[in-house]
C-alpha cells in the first residue's frame, strides 16, 4: 500500500502542470486517479493488515499536498477565492506546527484524525472536484453554488483547526 501512496505523490506535479496550463480535463483525470488510489491504499492496508508507521505519515501528507496544491493553483487561476485558500493553508500550517511542537516537547505521539478533520477533508475535496469538473467541461460553477461550497470548506476548516488546537493543547498539558 505504501507504493500506492508514493504513486499518488507522483501524480501531484502532473496535476499542478495541468491546472497551470488550463488542461482541466487532464487535471480531473489525475484528481480521480489520486482519489481512487487513496481509497485503494487504505483498503489494501486494512484488508492485508499492512498498516505501517510510514503509511500513517505518508497518507495524510499526500492528501494535504494534493489539497493544498489544488487550492493554491485554483486560486491562482481565479477558480476559487484566495481567502478560502488562505484559510485552508493556514489551518495546515497550524496543524504542522502543532505536530512539530508536540514532537519536540513530548516526543512522538500519534496525531489521529478527528471526525472534524475527516469532514473538512471531504468538503475540501468536494469543492475542488466541483470546480475542476466544471472547468473540465468548460462550464462555470454558478457563483452562488461556488460560494456555498467555499463557505462550507472554510467553515469546516476553521472548526477542525480549532478542534485540533484544543485537543493538542490538552495533550501538551497532560505531558
Image (cartoon, rainbow, N blue to C red):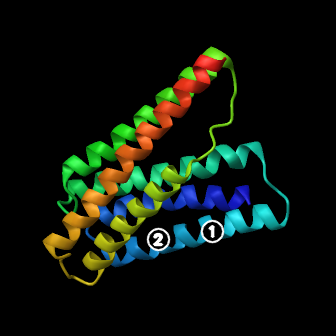
Q: Position of residue 60 (x, y in %)?
A: 57, 49
Q: Helix, strand or loop at disc 1? A: helix
Q: What residue is shown at x 42% (from left), y 55% (from top)? A: 67
Q: Nearer the viewer, residue 147 or 171?
A: 171
Judged left or right of residue 130, residue 83 is left
In the rendered image of this protein, does residue 133 appear above or below residue 85? below
In the rendered image of this protein, does residue 70 appear above or below residue 33? above
Q: Residue furthest right?
A: 49
Q: Position of residue 117 (x, y in %)?
A: 50, 50
Mark with earlier residue (1, 2): 2
How many labels sit on residues?
2
- Judged by depth in the image, the label closer to the viewer, 1 or 2, is 1
Q: Which residue is mark 2?
A: 30
- Do we see residue 104 in this rendering? no
In the rendered image of this protein, does residue 160 appear above or below residue 118? above
- Do we see residue 45 in this rendering? yes
Q: Residues within 10 Å of mark 2 (few under 14, many from 20)?
A: some
Q: Nearer the viewer, residue 144 or 54?
A: 144
Quarter where residue 104 is shown: top right
Q: Nearer the viewer, residue 79 or 156?
A: 156
Q: Residues within 10 Å of mark 1 (few under 14, many from 20)?
A: few
Q: What residue is shown at x 31% (from left), y 64% (from top)? A: 19
Q: Position of residue 30 (x, y in %)?
A: 46, 70
Q: Helix, strand or loop at disc 2? A: helix
Q: Position of residue 31 (x, y in %)?
A: 45, 69
- Asked whether the residues under the numbered discs 1 and 2 touch, taking CB atoms below 8 Å apart as contact, a structural biologist would say no
Judged left or right of residue 73, residue 109 is right
Q: Which residue is mark 1?
A: 39
Amino acid at each position: 500500500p505504501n507504493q500506492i501512496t508514493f504513486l499518488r505523490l507522483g501524480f501531484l506535479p502532473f496535476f499542478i502542470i495541468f491546472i497551470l496550463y488550463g488542461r482541466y480535463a487532464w487535471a480531473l483525470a489525475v484528481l480521480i486517479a489520486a482519489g481512487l488510489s487513496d481509497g485503494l491504499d487504505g483498503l489494501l492496508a486494512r484488508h492485508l493488515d499492512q498498516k505501517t508507521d510510514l503509511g500513517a505519515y505518508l497518507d495524510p501528507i499526500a492528501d494535504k499536498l494534493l489539497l493544498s496544491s489544488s487550492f493554491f493553483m485554483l486560486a491562482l487561476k481565479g477558480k476559487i477565492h484566495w481567502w478560502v485558500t488562505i484559510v485552508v493553508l493556514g489551518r495546515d500550517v497550524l496543524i504542522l506546527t502543532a505536530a512539530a511542537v508536540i514532537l519536540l516537547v513530548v516526543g512522538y505521539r500519534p496525531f489521529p484524525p478527528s471526525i472534524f478533520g475527516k469532514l473538512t477533508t471531504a468538503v475540501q475535496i468536494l469543492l475542488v472536484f466541483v470546480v475542476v469538473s466544471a472547468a473540465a467541461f468548460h462550464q462555470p460553477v454558478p457563483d452562488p453554488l461556488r460560494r456555498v461550497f467555499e463557505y462550507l470548506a472554510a467553515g469546516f476548516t476553521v472548526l477542525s483547526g480549532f478542534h485540533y488546537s484544543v485537543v493538542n493543547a490538552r495533550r501538551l498539558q497532560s505531558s
